[in-house]
Image (cartoon, grey):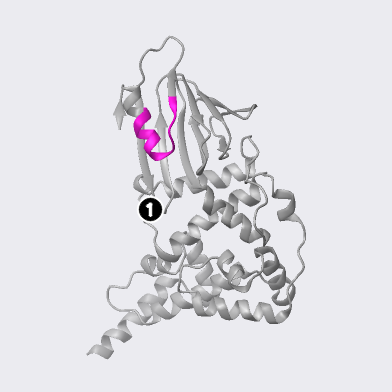
Amino acid sequence: MRTKDIDELTDAVSKIYCEHTVRVTGAARNVDGRLDVTSVASQPMVHLAYGAPVNVDAGNFTKLFLIKHCVRGAASASQDGQTAEWRQGQTMILSAGRETELKFDHAFLQRSVRLEIDKLEATCTRWLGHPLERPLQFALRPFSDALEQVWRQTLLYTASDEMGGPTLSGPAKESFDEYLRTLLLHQHAHNYSEELTDPSPAPLPRLVRRAERYIAENAALAITLPDVAAALGVSVRTLQNGFRQWRDTTPHEFLRQTRLRLVHDELCRSVENTDVTTVALRHGFTHMGRFSAYYQSAFGELPSTTLRRRRPTHRRAKL
C-alpha cells in the first residue's frame, strides 16, 4: 500500500496489529505512507513508514508482542512509564499488556514481526516446566549486538518475497516459529530470564531413552523440543540436561540427526522429480546452507550427490 491518507494507513495497520491512533506532529500535515506485508511462516513481517513524524497511541494491546527493527530513522517507545529509544540498525520488543506510546521521526522505516502471546508464553512454560505465575514481560531496551546480528539474518530470511526464499510448511514452519520464540526467550531479558538459567536436575537414563523413542517415532511430524518435553511430562531444561549427561549431546542434535536420516532415506528412494530443497523443508530444515553442511557431515557427501547417485539406479530398474 502507498497512501497519503493517514486514516487509510492507520486502518490497514490496525487490521494487522491492533487498534491504535496516529497523530502527525511537527510542520507536516500529511503522510507519505508505505505498507508492505510478507510472510514465510505464521509470522507476517510488516514494512511500515509514515514519511512524517508521528505519535502513535497503541493502547494496551493484549494478544501479541511486537518486535520492531529500525531500518532507518529513529524512534522512542514508552510502556507503563518506562521509555527507551532506538535508531537505525536496532531492534526493540514491545510487550503485551502494557500501555504503549510510540514516537517515530519522519525518516523512520520499520520491519516488524508480531508474535502471539499465547504461543510465546506456552513456549516459556514448556522451558520452565510449570505454568507462568504472571504475564511474560520483556525488558524495554534495544537488542544486544549479538542478538541484533542474529535477528537481522532472520529478517532477511523471512523476507521471502524480496529474497526469493521458500515458503515454509509442516515441520519446517513449526521449527522456524519455535526458533523465533526460543531465540527471544533466551537472548533478551524478561521476567523469567533468571529462572530459565537456573540449573535443573537431569532425568534418569530411562527417561532419555523414552525421549529418543518419541523423537524416532514422530520426527516426520511437525514436532519441536517443547513438544517432546511435554509428551514426557518434563521441562525442556530437564530434557537438555538429561541428553548432555547421558548421551553427551543435546535433544536438538538428536532430533536433527534423526531427520537427516529421514532425508537420506527419501533421497535414496528418489524418483525423477525429487528435489533436495523440497525434501529438506518437509523434514524441518529451513536453512539450505546449514542443512547441506549437516548432511555432508553425517553421510560423507552432499545431498545432491546422493540424489544424482540414486537416480540412474531407479531409471534402470524401471527399464
Where residue 137 sits in the image (x, y, percent)? 63, 42
Residue 22 screen position, x and y as percent:
43, 23
- Does the rendering let one see residue 19? yes
> Which image quarter: residue 243?
bottom right
Q: Residue at x 57, y 36 (%)?
A: 92
Q: Which residues are magenta?
A: 10-21
In depth, the one of 57 and 171 nearer the eye is 57
Residue toward you, 206 or 37: 206
Depicted 123 relative to depicted 82: above or below: below
Q: Secondary structure at mark 1?
A: loop
- Quarter of image, res 94: top right
Q: Residue at x 24, y 88 (%)?
A: 318
Residue indicated by mark 1? 165
**The disc labelled 1 sits on which kind of residue?**
Gly
Is any part of residue 300 visible from this angle? no
User: How far across and down, in percent of the image, does residue 197 sit?
Assistant: 73, 55
Q: Residue at x 49, y 30 (%)?
A: 58
In the image, residue 14 lies in the stretch drawn in magenta: yes
Is 227 placed above or below 124 here?
Answer: below
Farthest residue, direction left: 319
Q: Is residue 169 magenta?
A: no
